[in-house]
Image: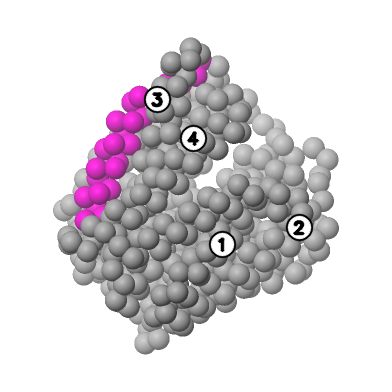
Amino acid sequence: MAASSSRFAIVALSLTYALYFGQLGVITPYLGVFLDGRGFSSVEIGELFAVITLARIIGPSLWAGVADRSGKILFILRLGSGLTVLSFIGVFWAYSFWYLTLVMGLMMMFWTAVLPQLEVLTLQTIEGDSKRYGRIRLWGSIGFIVLTVLVGKALDFFSTDAPIYASMLVLIGLFISSLTLTQPQNLKPKAAVAVRIMPFLRDKVALLFLLSNALLQLSFGAYYGFFALYMRDLGYSGMQTGLLIALGVTVEVGIFLVAQRLISRFGVWRLMVFCLLATGLRWLVLGTLADMFWLVFFSQFIHALSFGLNHSTSMHFIHHYFPTQIHGRIQAAYISLAFGLGGAVGNYAAGLLWQQGAGSMLTFSAAGACAAMGGLVLLLISPQQMDKHRSH
């Protein structure tokens, strides 16, 4: 690849990452604010978040199967981006619960086609250079931070519809950006893998690993669905809320840089238990002491553990514990069961609990208990069992 075309490819990939995660930085924190502005109850908000999250179970495997069989990675990415824009247009006229649920569910289903194919294109383009991958992937975090802060500020001046107008612009930009990408010539359809994964998923260590992560993601339901609303009700400005969310992502980026050294020193089991128990404390602080800004501020630093370090540790565990031939499918199971099923249950439960008299305190306390339970589940196995390496 010529130097000029290589530079253009890197810039195009970086921009696409920034827009993809920028959209995540709009929809994840502020969808609840938009839905509240449309007059939906906390139960309905939780249910809608659950439907969207469930799409993360079905979508990735569906699109990955099509991409693997056809080898048309770039076409699938562009198709997903284009259909996401077309389906999202319906949000502007969706005032009933079921219509909006249908629109958002379809949007998320198409949107899940983008990232897996983008990851493949990136790794093929840079030919496995992990340093260049890190520099490209960093733009995703930058996009998330910038859009989160900007939309938070916009909510101080405009209506609660501001997030969907921002999302529409970002999604259009994402589609245009996808048209600038190129598919490497050496990308070929993957050969079928004969190794079955069920025997490995029935393994005690694997089951408890997935259960602990599902409990962690279940605990995130309160944060993803109601944090921005909660901050608004406590008198925080949209700008302050956006900066608090951006702070969590910023420290998450920082922990990624040192995660491997921490794993080498402390091991998978100890770090995962620590991350889960710290997350339980984080939710407890938010539920009981959120009127104290400095406590909320410092609690956001725990996001480096709640997501960044725990996710890095989980990826390390998958890579070293399971045979190489099934890594892709084990990661799909991890995403589907933990982020998909665990996240959907958490969103639904948070919506139900938020409506009760105790509201925020009850919801975040329950979230804290779920995260702590995730840590306690790992006490059923030993550090040596999680840190051992299987022969591949």
**Tag 4–tag 1 contact (CB < 8 Å):** no
Measure the alpha-carbon separation of dots 4 and 2: 28 Å
Residue at 74% from the left image edge and 40% from the top image edge: 323
Measure the alpha-carbon separation of dots 3 and 2: 40 Å
**Tag 4–tag 2 contact (CB < 8 Å):** no
Which kind of residue does numbered mark 4 sit on? Ile
Q: Which span is picked out in magenta?
A: 162-185
Q: How many marks?
A: 4
Residue topped by disc 4:
136
Residue lying at the far front of the rendered structure: 294
Residue topped by disc 3:
181
Which kind of residue does numbered mark 2 sit on? Phe
Measure the alpha-carbon separation of dots 2 and 1: 17 Å
Measure the alpha-carbon separation of dots 3 and 1: 33 Å
Nearer to us in this view, 174 or 237 = 237
- Left or right? Give the position of 293 relative to 266: left
Please name which of the two marks, 3 or 2, marks the residue nearer to the observer.
2
Which kind of residue does numbered mark 3 sit on? Leu
Disc assigned to residue 266: 2
**Magenta residues: mostly which secondary structure?**
helix
Which x, y percent locates residue 283? 51, 73
Disc assigned to residue 306: 1
Work out whether mark 3 precedes mark 2 in sequence or the reverse, and give the earlier one: 3
Was residue 182 drawn as part of the magenta stretch in this picture?
yes
Was residue 231 drawn as part of the magenta stretch in this picture?
no
Work out whether mark 3 precedes mark 4 in sequence or the reverse, and give the earlier one: 4
Relative to 353, residue 112 above or below: above
